Image (cartoon, grey):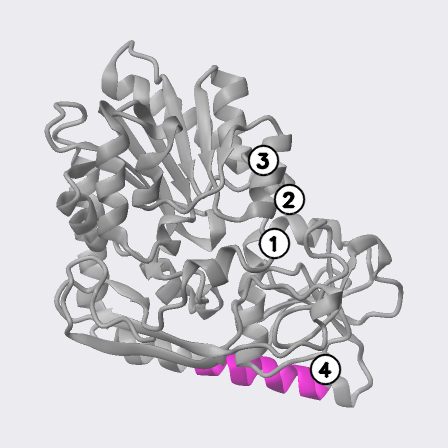
Amino acid sequence: MNRGACNICGSEHLSTLLDLGKHPLADTFLKQERFEAEEVHYPLVLAECENCGHVFTSFYIPPSKRYTETEYSYDSSNSPVSKAHFREFAADIVSTYRSLFGVREPRLATDIGSNVGTLLGYLKDDFGVNVVGIEPSPNIAAIAQSNGIPTACVLFDKGVLELDEFAGKTLDIIASTNVVNHMDDLRQMMEVIDAVSSENAMFAFEVPYLVDLLEEGAFDTVYHEHVNYFSAKAIGRLLDGGGFRAVRMQKISYMGGSVRVYAVRKTSPAGRGQADIETFLETEQAFFQANPAWRDDFRKRVFHIKRRLLAFVQAELKKGAKICCIGAATKGNTLLNYCKLDRDSIGLCCDVSRLKVGKKMPGSAIPIVHDNDIGPGWDFGIVLPWNLSDFLIDKFRRSGISLVFPIQGRLITKEGNIENLD
């Protein structure tokens, strides 16, 4: 069903920003027993709140369908890039907490959508912080438990308040990486954070940044699991309504462009007078003022990316080329399904994740094989996790495959030359 109101300010005055048609759930990679089963496709539409400017998917899909009815496939420990990022974030969380609250050490930390426990593992092992995870997907929570991370297999909603692990205001650190944007009820999320947090609590989270999405034309990061697309303005309004305020905000390159935010209670004296927040907001406001046609420009760019990729694939197939995909990234399913590319055009997709190899991509039904089993003779590899471009370019340097980056419109030939797709 359609969301009737903004999930930050509650306004019912909404407009359509982008309509990508109907798509299956992007993170529902198909196991063998589901190869022939019917797939459900839902409208994938971005709405913009005319009151506060927040951007979010307009069609509501229950969390149970997104995270519990089928095996969730994202593993936060899947690549050296992600592990290095989570280790750095853990260190930054602890150092920021110390700088805000003096010599006081954080006693207990949680991670909303803790996945297999990668971030919490670094907080626990590197800094001695007591941790407890929150992960709604049973298969992922089981992996976290096997990794030594105590994990509650629940959604982060009011049900958390009934768990012994979160009784009282005991949490000093509430972290989240690329999960706040998954939340359907942001105001309830802030209510729960308030209820489980100590007076010296710090909310540390990362979310993909709306301005980066617009500037990059990265429409592939739009999928049903990603409900919210945050601007700094929207983040500030969300925190303020929940009794928190940002004390630090910075852009980071992770996930192709994100914003890292540290927030404390509005009543806390910690971190007052942080000038970087105002600078961030002013820079963002200047972007929108300088680009009054940003909505139309974004829609045109999305269509151009689709037309350019299809022209390239069709031209190369006519020449007899063999095309595969590199990396079974969830966002790649938005790209493939919006562009109507399937196993008739793309022979396979290679990946290393134990949660994806042997399955098929939703919608396109492209089979997923291990990187080691890709075999010879492939001419082009469409890189789906383009945020890992440096790592993948180095990994496939001697493979004889030319790498295609559709969003960026470039091609890295097997000889190492950079060409434009246009």
Q: What residue is disc 2 on?
A: 78
Left or right position of 242 against 173: left
Residue 185 screen position, x and y as percent: 28, 55
Q: For marks 2 and 3, give the one nearer the viewer.
A: 3
Q: In the picture provided, is 297 more to the left or to the right than 244?
A: right
Magenta stretch prevailing secondary structure: helix
Report the residue at 22% width, 46% height from top.
280
Q: Nearer the viewer, residue 47 or 65?
A: 65
**Could you tell which of marks 2 and 3 lies nearer the N-terminus?**
2
Q: Earlier in the sequence, mark 2 or mark 4?
A: 2
Please tell me which residue lies in front, 21 or 185: 185
Earlier residue among tags 3 and 4: 3
SS type, badge 1? loop
Q: Nearer the viewer, residue 400 or 82?
A: 82
Give the percent coordinates (x, y) of residue 174.
34, 33
Q: Looking at the picture, which amino acid does disc 1 mark?
A: Ser
Q: Above or below — where is 407 with respect to 158?
A: below
In the picture, the disc for residue 144 is: 3
Query: Residue 300: which quarter of the image?
Result: bottom left
Q: Amino acid at mark 4?
A: Ser
Q: CA distance from mark 2 to mark 4?
A: 27 Å
